[in-house]
Image: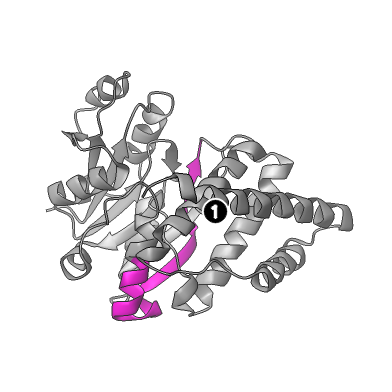
Amino acid sequence: MAVISIIVPFYNSEKYIKDCVESLLSQQFPANDYEIIFVDNNSTDSSVNIVKRYPRIKLVSEGRQGSYTARNRGIREASGRVVAFTDPDCIASPDWLAQIAEAMSDPVVSVVLGQHLMANDSPLLSMVQDYENEKNVYTFGSNDGNIYFGHTNNMAVRRELFNDVGLFVERKRGADTIFVNSVVKRYSTRAVVYRESMTVRHLEIEKPLDYYKKIFTYGRSRKLYRNIANIPPISYSQRLSIFKNVIIKKNYSYPKSLTLFILLIAGVIFWQAGALSAGIYKN
């Protein structure tokens, strides 16, 4: 039985999937202690053929469309005591599994979330990344379970937790946050931790516009799942506190601080636009 099972759902991911696979095969972690499960979700490109080149990868298929449906299929296939999730457009740092194992050595911890880096370290993306990491530090250090969220591009869960809380709600977006919300309500905020040294690099976010597209999607998703879990976004005053923390911790100059502020204002606009668009979407 594996100690950790890694689950990666994919759909038409040929651009990045090779890098993802190789990062998972190159972990600084005993090979016999983890398994890798890729779940094909009806891909029509060469993604499946790329995965098949690696005999160590367990490849399964899920015919019902949806990334959370595919993740649930992976959970059913998993043998590990801990289930780790990432996405096919992400590459895990070499010590990713070691970081997960260390976090899970605390028996109180049932869910651990890590930091996702941008595709490159350009000046603008680096500033956005500083803010997003500080937002995570603030959120998961607040002990306010109402603002906790999930992100399955860098998340690990004790396998037994799915027996208690259930699998992911099978919807287009937001099931990871709904899941974390359920865990916090059942076990308290102590069960969920954020570990900024547990990193994956999100290859899809190559420029600020890619980041804003994600923000738009998150704004729409948050609005859509409020009927299942009424999880409020962090307030503007909290966002301002996070902004100030970034400036102090990273010793930002005035011009750099102003640039970050403008980037964040644009993010708020995209978030609100996404929320307004929710009326024409389902799930």
In the displayed structure, 19 sits above or below 66; it is above
Looking at the picture, tell me which residue is in the foreground, 22 or 155. 155
Q: Which residue is mark 1?
A: 275
Q: Is residue 164 magenta?
A: no
* Residue in view at x 81 percent, y 57 percent: 257
Q: Is residue 200 magenta?
A: yes
Q: Is residue 32 visible?
A: no
Q: Amino acid at mark 1?
A: Ala
Give the farthest residue toward the left.
1
Secondary structure beneath dot 1 equals helix
Q: Would you identify the image quadrant in which residue 237 lies? A: bottom right
Q: Which residues are magenta?
A: 180-203
* Residue in view at x 38 percent, y 42 percent: 87
Horizontal and vertical percent for residue 159?
A: 20, 62
Q: In the visual, does 72 lie left or right of 119?
A: left
* Residue in view at x 72 percent, y 66 percent: 249
Q: In the visual, does 91 lie left or right of 271?
A: left
Q: Is residue 81 visible?
A: yes
Looking at the picture, tell me which residue is in the foreground, 233 or 154. 233
